[in-house]
Amino acid sequence: MVVLFCGLAGAFLLNLWGRTAPLKLIPLVDRSFLDTATVRRSYADLVAAKDDLSDFDCYACHERKKPPVLRYDANHKLIVPQEHSDIVMGHGEQGRNNNCFNCHDETNLEQLLARDGRVVKFQDSPQLCGSCHGPTFEDWEAGAHGRISGYWDRKLGAFKRQACVNCHNPHSPKFPSRKPAPGPHLLRPPIAVPTETADAN
Ligand code: HEC
Ligand code: HEC
Ligand code: HEC
Ligand code: HEC
């Protein structure tokens, strides 16, 4: 017996059967995935934060009684002037809605003009978008498109509905694809699933 137990103790000491590998440290999720800020700040956000509004001060450069003239190249593609080079037009796949005055009011640049002729303030730009994107606008109002944050119970506090331009650049509104957030970390390596069971699904 003594010899047997000494032998066993020796085997354990020498680690003859090996040890289970130590668990790997789980890396922390990249902080950028936890950021709740929207991809853009709207005019309303800039006003609320008392930020630089010079881009919206149209008549610092334009003349009130002289609407800017739209210029096109030989392929009837809109030429965006140097002073507005931060604007990249690409509204719709074929640039179908690139005409500045489909949205901006020619006679008063400091306001927007909806498709149905309604004058819309920059703060209320979803009304403009809604005049062409009716179904999406209705989804947005119902809370199925976009994002609402704040209180579910309105008695406890206010809620905030993000504007279309918080997520879509009005000039090139296609939402760029983004990297998906990583899946949950498994404590142990997954067990291989037999192929028959996998196929049954
Ligand atoms: C820093 C000066 C500056 C500001 C601020 C500015 N613009 Fe302009 N904009 C220009 C210049 C310069 C041109 C080119 C000459 C022209 O057409 O008058 C231009 C051209 C335009 C055009 C014609 C674009 C084209 O493709 O031909 C539109 C429309 C326009 N601006 C709208 C606006 C609106 C709306 C605002 C405010 C929200 C604004 N601009 C603010 C300087 C400015
Ligand atoms: C689909 C509608 C739409 C079209 C088309 C459009 N705009 Fe705009 N534009 C907007 C809206 C809405 C805002 C305000 C966005 C916000 O709140 O951030 C804006 C903001 C601006 C601003 C101020 C902020 C900035 O981005 O500099 C300028 C200048 C401007 N537009 C010029 C133009 C010019 C020039 C054209 C044509 C080449 C044009 N826009 C075409 C809807 C449009
Ligand atoms: C004057 C009408 C009009 C207005 C106003 C308008 N849009 Fe559009 N929008 C269009 C058209 C036309 C298309 C292209 C549809 C297509 O190509 O099938 C489009 C396409 C889009 C797309 C899809 C882009 C893509 O490339 O897949 C988005 C997103 C969008 N608009 C958002 C907005 C937002 C946000 C606003 C308000 C700032 C707005 N639109 C205002 C007419 C409009
Ligand atoms: C919180 C962000 C957010 C807000 C707010 C938002 N959208 Fe979107 N929208 C998206 C995303 C993300 C997509 C892209 C979905 C995809 O690529 O499958 C999208 C897609 C779209 C499209 C493309 C066609 C479609 O329905 O898939 C249109 C048009 C559109 N949005 C219009 C609007 C309008 C108009 C508003 C405001 C009334 C608005 N969006 C508000 C995030 C937003």
Image (cartoon, helix red, strand yellow):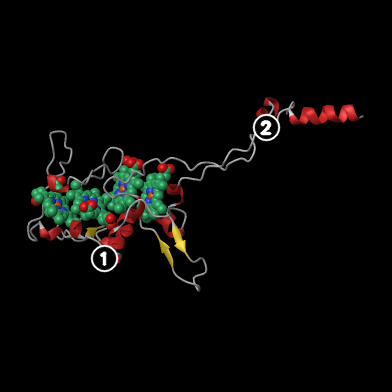
Q: Quadrant of the C terminus?
A: top right
Q: Quadrant of residue 9?
A: top right
Gap in Å between the C-alphas at discs 1 and 2?
Answer: 56 Å
Where does the image place residue 20, in percent across and percent down from the top left?
A: 69, 33
Query: Would you say 139 lies left or right of 2 here?
Result: left
Look at the image and tell me whether residue 66 can be seen. Answer: yes
Q: Which residue is mark 2?
A: 191
Query: Would you say 118 lies left or right of 2 here?
Result: left
Q: Quadrant of residue 89?
A: top left
Task: Report the residue at 34% width, 43% height from top.
Answer: 174
In the current view of this chain or complex, which residue is farthest to the right?
Answer: 1
In the current view of this chain or complex, which residue is farthest to the bottom?
Answer: 155
The secondary structure type at the circle numbered 1 is loop
Task: Report the residue at 24% width, 59% height from top.
Answer: 117
Count numbered badges in the picture.
Answer: 2
Amino acid found under the numbered disc labelled 2: Ile
Q: Earlier in the sequence, mark 1 or mark 2?
A: 1
Amino acid found under the numbered disc labelled 1: Lys
Where does the image place residue 65, in percent across and percent down from the top left?
A: 7, 60
The secondary structure type at the circle numbered 2 is loop
Where does the image place residue 12, in percent across and percent down from the top left?
A: 77, 31
> Depth check: 163 or 72 in front?
163
Look at the image and tell me whether residue 134 can be seen. Answer: no
> Depth check: 21 or 85 in front?
21
Residue 35 to residue 4: above or below: below
Q: Which residue is mark 1?
A: 50
